[in-house]
Image: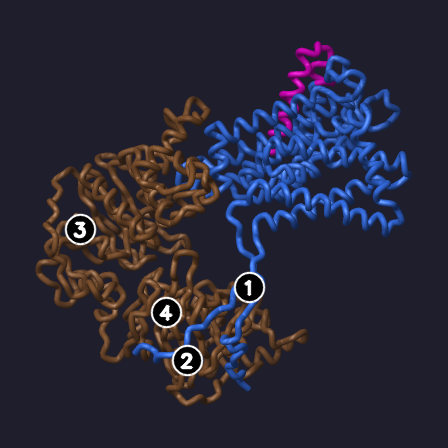
Amino acid sequence: MARTPGPTLPSTEPIRRWTLERVHRPTILAQAIVTVASVLLGLVLGGIIMIIAGENPFEVYRAMFTGAFSGEYNLSETLVKTIPLLLTGLGVSIAFRMQLWNIGAEGQFYFGAIFASGVAIFWLPDAGPWVVIPAMMVAGMVGGALWGAIPGALRGYLGVNETITTLMMNYVAILVAEYLVHGPWRDPMAFGFPGTESFSEATYLPTWGTTRVHLGLIFGLVAAIVLSVVFRRTRWGYEIGVTGASERVAQYAGMRTARNIVLVLAFSGALAGLAGMAEVAGINHSLQRGLSPGYGYTAIIVAWLGRLNPAGIVVVSFLLAGLLVGGDQLQITLGLPSAIAPMLQGVILFCLLAGDFFTRYRVTRVRAIAPAPASGEAAS
Amino acid sequence: MTGALPERSPAGDEAIGLYGVTKRFGPVTANRDVTFSAAWGEVHALVGENGAGKSTLMSILAGLYRPDSGIVRIDGRPVDFRSPGDARAAGVGMVYQHFMLVESFTVTENVMLGDPSSGLRLDAAAVDADLRRLSAAYGLDVDPNARIWQLSVGERQRVEIVRSLHQGARILVLDEPTAVLTPGESEQLIRTLRGMAAEGFCIIFISHKLDEVLAVADRISVLRRGELIGTVPSAGTTRRDLARMMVGRELAGTLLDEGEAPPHPAGPVVLSVDHLSANGDKGVPALREVSFEIRAGETLGIAGVAGNGQRELGEVIAGMRRPTHGRVRLGERDITNWHPREVAAAGVAHVPEDRLGTGLAPTMEVDQNAILRAYERKPIARGSFLVASAVDRFTDGLIERFDVKTPSRSTAVRDLSGGNQQKLLIARELAGEPRAIVAVHPTRGVDVGAAEVIHDVLRAQRERGAATLLVSEDLEELLALCDRILVLAGGEVMGAVRAHGADIEVIGEMMAGTPLDRVESVAQGALAGGANANG
């Protein structure tokens, strides 16, 4: 049986329906409104989940806000968590600008920490702060850069998908760190606990008063300024921008794309490595297991919410750090699971991604199609 | 749905009718008031150059686009396709150039995939049997158990056709079906399609190979610049007639002799290519043994239907594509395989075919696009840094000299009109006073005013002594701007003629694939310029 060629709808009926239209340039105002609205919606949805869980969302939010931003101690703890988020967030944003999906900041963070720890413990155990701290910084950046450059070279010269390699190298880096702290680098005096011996005091990054806020914050802010200059004012930043906008245009202009891919991922990794160095030199003073609660992954969120803009990343890393610290406080003050923080983080990100859609598209109603009269014979 | 023998509609009744169909994309009108119809039992060919609107028309039939106005009728009843599924349900089957098949699946699995009639229950045996029956009925030799990756291109195409038949298609639309086939496979396909038409199917055959169209079609409709120029029966129509309709009736048959003869350039050879061959993106040869020389102050036009090696030629010269054979020379220097940046620095400007994907980064601002060729040199670069004031000055200079209409330097390039994008691109490429210019379709899709500016600019460059290679599908443009015109078809040089006094029909026939020395009734005068074309 053949299907009869059938009419579906006579097109003389006026047709109305909704359609999406691409908006060429979202205005800053539209972006701001959508961002704020998305965050608010995220908080409302998060609140609904809390109600389902039997909590009063207003109380929870107040407790979180107080826990994150009120009082010197709370605020300083938020700043402490801002440092790794800021550095790793800036790091991945460089790669994202070139449309390279570096989700390996976590591994690059660990490798930076490993290299910096090696310098502190084995190479310069007795050096003064003016020697050992810069040496650790360089080592941390080299470690992270190396961990970024490997997937970079694979992608640039062999076309291996960097999303997968950077992700997988996270596990390798974390396991290397585990191996070191359980095996060759384990502190013999620690009664079998995994972890290296403590670094000399010369390696301690200077802190702000009595708080734990350390020099890493300055690293982060300087890195943000350097990046905004690189992106806007240098030849290399221009090449990254062009390659990110269109790889074919970069090829047409004769830019060395493969080399730039390696450099960008190395630079990206170097900042994550610096974050790892700052964490061991500023907070832990030794290399331990579980050094990062997933900063390198949160970095991806930070970079996107900050719209890959260094200033935006500074703001967002502070706010997300507040969310983490406030979530931890919930456990103490209200006896709630700290998992509320990542839950909220997820809901807000979800709303922002959905909201982003509305900055790029506009919903419009399609006007009725007026069909031309079916007159005239086919040309022959 | 099994069994696809069309219900016998009386042959000659309308299968597909388009009435006053217009489709616009922003400022571009892809189809303007197109009216044509094809009957049951007919092979109806749709010919036209690339960009003539064939694909858009086809997408309307396929349910991918809805026309802005006009009516589509299937079997006499008006339809409004809102999705490809609607078109399929109405019995319209599409065979695209790029096959929609899953390589690791068998033929039967591919046919079952996405077949709306199968529902949740998969009956592979029934599908298998139906495929065998259809294969036998129409001479479409296909093994239902073969996996797609094992099949040749011709076999894959047959799978596409059989799949459409299985889904109940009674109208089959094929987009340049022979472009991927060997001559033997093409002949087989043509036999199959004729056989299907005899069974009552309506076949729409899209192509720009005129010989083939004449061999397969009952009637031929010609599109040019989005408009339907006319429909002719293939009996009694010659290739020459079709070529004339494709390239423009108002020009055809006249020897262009208005205007004074351009002075023959006597400058030294600036750009030359010697037995150049190169592969296209798919790895098949796209350029075969192309040779020519361009002197200072000379403009050589490349005529031909798009997709006959023009883009590849431009890319090889610009260093973006490696030739498989042959040399490119700039003056005395061999620049074959040079890096694009070195080629540009040596003085070759390249206006690529794909304006907004190759030549300009659409999401970047006007100033960022303006400095693409200059960002490494003074005054824009100072060491590793870019000097913002120099960027602004440079951008303003280009905007002013070439009359680029843009709200500001920081407007994204994609927000400019096509004409202004092209002016910006050309302004940038010519800013360095290049010795040689490779311009591929520089006025395609731009408005008349911008096209005029671009023509003036190219003339001024010729006066200045630049050697220009101008690729265009617009013969009027080539005749107006060039000293000589060389025709490419299938990646080969069909011949070259002096532009002044050239016979349009001769060029049209060469575009259709006839070498100059075999063109019937070549006017003696037209040959004069050809002698030194390959030298």
**Chain in brown (letter):** B
Label 1 CA crowd tier, 10 Å (few <14, some 14–19, many 20+): some
As shown in the figure, which amino acid type bears the numbered disc 1?
Val
Left or right of residue B380: residue A361: right
- Give me the residue at 56% from left, 69% from top: B110
- Circle 2 chain: B
Q: Which residues are magenta?
A: A120-148
Residue with the mark numbered 4: B33
**Mark 3 lies on residue:** B484
Q: Earlier in the sequence, mark 3 or mark 4?
A: 4
Same subunit under labels 2 and 4? yes
Q: CA distance from mark 1 to mark 2?
A: 27 Å
Q: Specify whether residue A126 is painted magenta.
A: yes
Q: Residue at x 77, y 49 (%)?
A: A45
Question: Which class describes the residues within 10 Å of circle 2: few (<14), some (14-19), or many (20+)?
Answer: many
Front: mark 1 or 4: 4
Query: Residue flagged by tag 3: what amino acid is it?
Result: Arg
Q: Are marks 3 and 4 in contact (CB under 8 Å)?
A: no
Are discs 1 and 4 less than 8 Å apart at CB?
Answer: no
**Can you give x and y, in whole percent of width and height, for residue B375 in the image?**
40, 30
Mark 3 vs mark 4, CA separation in Å: 36 Å
